[in-house]
């Protein structure tokens, strides 16, 4: 509705306050302790699991041991886990996905979030429709706060990117926490 | 027209439930405190957020154009709606164009504000709310009573009975874990069937033409990554200039809302999936009018965290439905008079003006000051109820006549201690309905002052 656009813009021009400047975001203090440790502590508080100290080869067997019943698995890193589902028939084919192994890009210690982009999600729904989600993260890519995370991401955002902090959850019935709402029922992050 | 106090009285009929509601929300407020105190720069973040929002309001037209240009370059279709009716029409047209019949929706206070569900349902389109709390109130045919916890007014037994009736769960199943699992299973099916997925917008970024949606359940993502069409609806005030500003707001939002350090999912959308459609509807619906009210425009800073509700002694004890407006609580009480001053004239009075709402607000809206200012406007425009209007007029007149004032005080003190209880606590005594009157003092302050501080001079 082109006319509405003009109406809205002219109303704003008429009503908007005098210009105020954008503030500079300062560099806030960063804890001196080990960020990967802080990251793990925070993520565990929000219901995620963190595994560290394993080599890439060991991660594969750790996954198979932790999820022995997972039949439909997707992974884009065959050295960690072999995929046995196809993505070519669209997102709905992933209905019965048990496990997805996805490479994360940045970890944020203050809130346990991992930045994942569509570069690692050939179907965006992978990270949500799967029963259990596994994220791989280079522990040198962990920063303290969200400001640093966005500095690393830069100004050009991907087509789709997401901070994931813990499994899907809800407290909509009497504020009692239930893990596994509409998305994954668990999240495990392997720090490599 | 039923006012806030009358509806609050209904909510208060069940005292045990009110106490539970009060304590539960206070617990959420407490979690917010713990979470915010873990961030040494918390107050600085609030200042930054308020300053960014002030800048946005002062350049809103330019940012909207920048956003539109970048969004179109990303392959997003941008629509403008000056009111709720236009918003609903636009959404309906998009759905019709793709011959959509089934819509899944994640939480969007804007679509609640526009009553989109009813509009679409009247046109034979099925809308399924997918946030668990929203789904519960959709099934019970109610409005949300809180913007973050839509079904906080319900006990698990009520949800269990509702699910038994509507979803076929076993009778007497009241365990939140099992009820959530039942809802999950049914919603899975809906996600897979949907033709169109609708979401709200937490933040839209002018410099990228993209937007961010925050959920804990993952329901927004389940919807939009399956359905071929994604429609995102946003109020025009949701804009922020740059990516770096997300850092400030995402640090504040979840901590203020539930005490979580961040929501489980903060999804950044910039382009549609290959072969799919993405639409954004930019909605005014009274926002430009609010922008033109200097005393009240700061309420457009709101990021819908709900902290002001959790802390408000009135909200906690009167429940969200007593406000009869999409956004309840203190923030709703300053937003609603801008939409319909007559209808919502009692809301700015649903406050003790204690100021706790302003203290917890992550974007520093001066909520309690605005409540006070709305009261004055509502009185001037003649929207006060007769009882309040006349008692204020009487009190004003009495106070302007010192001799009469003193005399009536003297009579009052005497008479109060003599009159039978039924007379003192008559229907006219609003104060005495739920409280004891203070015992009448032996003398007035005026007399006391003359005797004690005026060197005995009368």
Image (spheres, coloured by chain):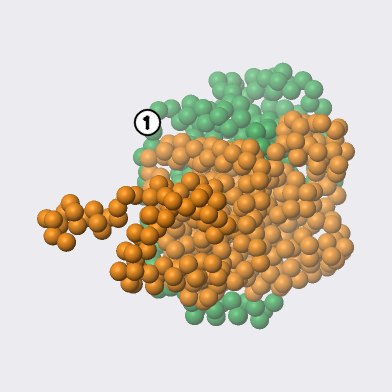
Chain colours: A green, B orange
Q: Is residue B293 above or below residue B71?
A: below
Q: Which residue is mark 1?
A: A32
Q: Quadrant of the N terminus of chain B?
A: bottom right
Quick check: can you spot residue B344?
Answer: yes
> Label 1 is found on which chain of the structure?
A
Q: Residue at x 78, y 37 (%)?
A: B160
Residue drawn at (85%, 33%) of the image = B171
Residue A39: x and y, percent? 51, 31
| Image quadrant assignment for residue B427 | bottom right
x and y percentages locating residue A185 in the rendered image: 71, 32
**Disc 1: CA contacts within 10 A as few (<14), some (14-19) or many (>=20):** few
Q: Position of residue B330 (x, y in %)?
A: 52, 56
Left or right: A17 with respect to A175? left
Observer-nearest of A99 and B326: B326
Q: Quadrant of residue B48?
A: bottom left
Residue shown at 83% from the left, 61% from the top: B121
The secondary structure type at the circle numbered 1 is loop
Q: Is residue B327 above or below residue B403?
A: above
């Amino acid at each position: 509705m082109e006319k509405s656009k003009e109406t809205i813009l002219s109303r704003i021009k008429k009503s908007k306050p005098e210009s105020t400047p954008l503030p500079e975001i300062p560099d806030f203090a960063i804890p001196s302790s080990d960020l990967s440790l802080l990251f793990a502590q925070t993520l565990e508080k929000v219901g995620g699991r963190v595994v560290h100290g394993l080599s890439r080869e060991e991660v594969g067997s750790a996954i198979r041991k932790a999820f022995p019943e997972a039949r439909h698995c997707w992974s884009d890193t065959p050295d960690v886990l072999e995929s046995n589902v196809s993505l070519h028939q669209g997102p709905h084919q992933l209905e019965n996905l048990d496990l997805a192994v996805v490479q994360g890009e940045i970890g944020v210690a203050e809130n346990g979030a991992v930045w994942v982009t569509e570069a690692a999600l050939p179907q965006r729904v992978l990270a949500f429709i799967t029963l259990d989600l596994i994220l791989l993260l280079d522990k040198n890519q962990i920063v303290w706060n969200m400001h640093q995370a966005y500095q690393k991401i830069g100004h050009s955002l991907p087509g789709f990117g997401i901070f994931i902090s813990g499994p899907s959850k809800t407290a909509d019935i009497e504020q009692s926490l239930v893990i596994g709402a509409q998305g994954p029922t668990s999240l495990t992050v392997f720090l490599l | 027209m039923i006012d806030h106090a009358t509806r609050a009285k209904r909510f208060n009929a069940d005292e045990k439930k009110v106490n539970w509601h009060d304590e539960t929300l206070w617990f959420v407020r407490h979690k917010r405190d713990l979470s915010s105190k873990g961030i040494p720069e918390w107050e600085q973040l609030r200042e930054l957020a308020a300053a960014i929002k002030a800048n946005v309001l002062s350049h809103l037209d330019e940012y909207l154009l920048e956003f539109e240009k970048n969004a179109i370059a990303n392959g997003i279709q941008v629509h403008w709606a000056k009111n709720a009716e236009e918003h609903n029409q636009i959404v309906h047209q998009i759905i019709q164009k793709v011959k959509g019949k089934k819509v899944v929706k994640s939480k969007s206070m804007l679509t609640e504000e526009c009553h989109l569900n009813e509009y679409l349902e009247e046109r034979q389109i099925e809308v399924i709310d997918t946030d668990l709390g929203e789904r519960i109130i959709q099934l019970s045919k109610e409005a949300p009573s809180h913007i973050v916890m839509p079904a906080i007014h319900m006990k698990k037994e009520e949800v269990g009975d509702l699910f038994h009736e509507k979803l076929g769960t076993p009778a007497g199943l009241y365990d939140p874990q099992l009820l959530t699992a039942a809802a999950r299973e049914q919603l899975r099916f809906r996600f897979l069937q949907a033709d169109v997925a609708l979401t709200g917008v937490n933040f839209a970024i002018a410099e990228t033409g993209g937007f961010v949606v925050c959920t804990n359940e993952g329901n927004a993502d389940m919807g939009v990554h399956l359905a071929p069409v994604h429609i995102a609806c946003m109020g025009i005030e949701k804009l922020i200039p740059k990516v770096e500003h997300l850092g400030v707001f995402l640090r504040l939002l979840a901590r203020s809302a539930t005490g979580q350090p961040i929501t489980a999912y903060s999804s950044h959308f910039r382009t549609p999936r290959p072969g799919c459609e993405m639409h954004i509807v930019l909605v005014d619906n009274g926002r430009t009018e609010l922008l033109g009210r200097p005393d009240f425009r700061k309420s457009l800073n709101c990021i819908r965290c709900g902290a002001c509700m959790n802390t408000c002694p009135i909200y906690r004890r009167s429940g969200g439905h007593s406000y009869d407006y999409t956004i309840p609580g203190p923030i709703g009480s300053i937003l609603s008079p801008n939409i319909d001053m007559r209808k919502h004239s009692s809301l700015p009075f649903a406050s003790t003006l204690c100021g706790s709402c302003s203290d917890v607000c992550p974007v520093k809206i001066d909520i309690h000051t605005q409540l006070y200012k709305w009261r004055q406007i509502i009185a001037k425009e003649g929207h006060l109820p007769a009882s309040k209007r006349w008692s204020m007029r009487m009190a004003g007149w009495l106070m302007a006549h010192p001799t009469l004032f003193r005399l009536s005080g003297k009579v009052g003190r005497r008479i109060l201690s003599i009159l039978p209880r039924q007379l003192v606590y008559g229907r006219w005594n609003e104060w005495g309905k739920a409280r004891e009157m203070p015992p009448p003092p032996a003398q007035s302050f005026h007399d006391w002052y003359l005797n004690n501080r005026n060197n005995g001079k009368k």
